[in-house]
Amino acid sequence: MRKLICRICGAIIDDKNYFYNAEAFEGKNTLDNISFCPFCGAPRKYMISKNENAEEQKYNFDAGSLKIIDHAYKLEIFNGDFYDKVSKLAANIQIKNMFRSLSRVEYVHANIHRKIGGFTVKPKLKSLDYSKYKSDGELLNMACKREKHAVEYYERYADKMNDYQVKKIFDVLAKVEKMHIDLTKKAN
Ligand SMILES: [Zn+2]
């Protein structure tokens, strides 16, 4: 396959990685039909061929916008960490694998915000213990709640971002998190 670049997360998609994180997606990429980025979940229309010239994005945010991006960065790290931890607690192997893939995708989202915000320090977040949740059902409910919160966040702030590219990123991520709501509901 032709190498593609995802304009949302910057990943290069090729024949060695197009199938990554499959458990975190509803659709399926095949070698001759790539429909989403296996790293961040952005749809195909946000990809360009590797030979095309992608100009480097430069951002200049006011304090308010930067704060919104910083919060999104923390939200995604928090969710990435959550999925990583609950992937170790889940009993069902499919749910375990889905959590693991979702963790990777949320960390990619965090990295998108880190790059656009130019953040150099990884925020220290309170380490939470989820071991009191005794069943996969409880873990899935908690996951679903977090995804709903993420969707609300992106939808609330997408319109407040003056930068067109960032607005687009928020729109795309809202849709990806919506799919995560579906996945966590269906698995439950
Ligand atoms: Zn991507």
Image (cartoon, helix red, strand yellow):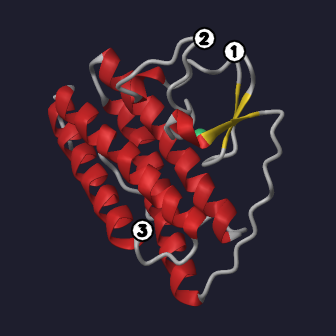
Q: Position of residue 128 (x, y in %)?
A: 37, 55
**Image check: 90 left or right of 68?**
left
In this orientation, does residue 78 appear?
A: no
| Amino acid found under the numbered disc labelled 2 | Leu
Q: How many marks?
A: 3
Task: Classify mark 3 as within 8 Å of ligand 1 or not, answering yes or no.
Answer: no
Q: CA distance from mark 3 to mark 1?
A: 33 Å
Identify the disc placed on residue 15.
1
* 29 is higher (above) or lower (below) than 109: above
Distance from disc 2 to disc 1, alpha carbons, whole Å, reads 7 Å
Query: Is residue 98 shown above or below 178?
Result: above
Report the residue marked by disc 3.
158
Residue at disc 2, secondary structure: loop
Residue density around tag 1, few if under 14, some if 14–19, many if 20 or more, within 10 Å: few
Looking at marks 3 and 2 on the same chain, the residue that comes earlier in the sequence is marked by 2
Query: Is 47 or 111 nearer to us in this picture?
Result: 47
